[in-house]
Image (cartoon, rainbow, N blue to C red):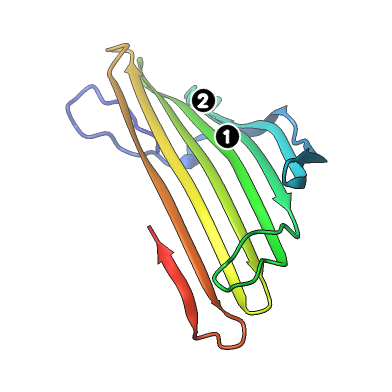
Amino acid sequence: LLFVPSPSNERARVPSPARFDSVRTDTVSPLSVAVDQILTQKGPFDFVHMSPYIFSVIASSSTSGDSMVVTYNVNSTGLLRRNEVEGSIGSSTETKDSDRDFAFGYMRQEVVTMTHVGDSWLRRNSTTFYSYKSDTCNGADEATFDLNANVTWSRSRFEEYASSEEEDMLDVFWGNSIQAAARYNRSLSNHTAVNIAKGH
């Protein structure tokens, strides 16, 4: 969203994206994924790590001097363990076949725009930060199927505005987050027989 400053008190208008006549991309840090295996007290885990992937999209106008730079920074790590032996999952027997998946990471997006109207200019710096964490375990024994999951997700947003008339116009911040957990356990022979179904 691009705002155009006006010397009057009129509301800002949104210009057409066609005003940019040059668009290019720039990879600051290329994508790199490493897969390894680590040993814990519960046994081996497959370890998947994606190094910070940073790239930018740069748009500019050779006539007005307007510009927009969008930068992404993505980072992710995952742990996966198969055939994990757990305790009771709703019946009297142990889990014989179970997968555990744990992942966490973040994405940061920054948008910087510079807009000119005559001798006036407006700069907007918008930064959004997303983070997530998930812990999922699913398995089955001779009688039941079990799914257990915990998910945490959050978003933070920062907005900063400056103009040729006022260097520090407005700084705004807001954020929200979600924390959820659920468990579902049912019979393998009778799919309508649910032993556990809860979440919050």
- Picture layout, residue 64 above or below residue 46: above
- Picture layout, residue 64 above or below residue 50: above
Residue type marked 2: Thr
- For label 1, the crowd category at 10 Å Cα-Cα, with few meaning under 14, some 14 to 19 and many 20 or more, is few
The residue indicated by pointer 1 is: 21
- Secondary-structure class at tag 2: loop
Q: Residue at x 53, y 57 (%)?
A: 149
x%, y% of residue 92? Answer: 59, 72
Front residue of this view, candidates 22 and 102 = 102
Q: Is residue 164 left or right of residue 130?
A: left
x%, y% of residue 47? Answer: 75, 42
Q: Residue at x 49, y 38 (%)?
A: 130
Q: CA distance from mark 1 to mark 2?
A: 9 Å
- For label 2, the crowd category at 10 Å Cα-Cα, with few meaning under 14, some 14 to 19 and many 20 or more, is few
- Picture layout, residue 168 above or below residue 177: above
Q: How many marks?
A: 2
Instruction: Residue at the far bottom: name it.
Output: 190
Check contact, mark 1 vs mark 2: CB within 8 A. Answer: yes
Quarter residue 73 falls in:
top right
x%, y% of residue 22? Answer: 61, 32
Q: Residue at x 74, y 40 (%)?
A: 40
- Secondary-structure class at tag 1: loop
Front residue of this view, candidates 193 and 61 = 193
Give the quadrant of the C terminus: bottom left
- The tag earlier along the polypeptide, 1 or 2, is 1
Marker disc for residue 63: 2
Q: Is residue 172 left or right of residue 155?
A: left
Q: Is residue 35 visible?
A: no
Q: Is residue 189 left or right of residue 114?
A: right
Residue type marked 1: Asp
Q: Residue at x 41, y 65 (%)?
A: 198
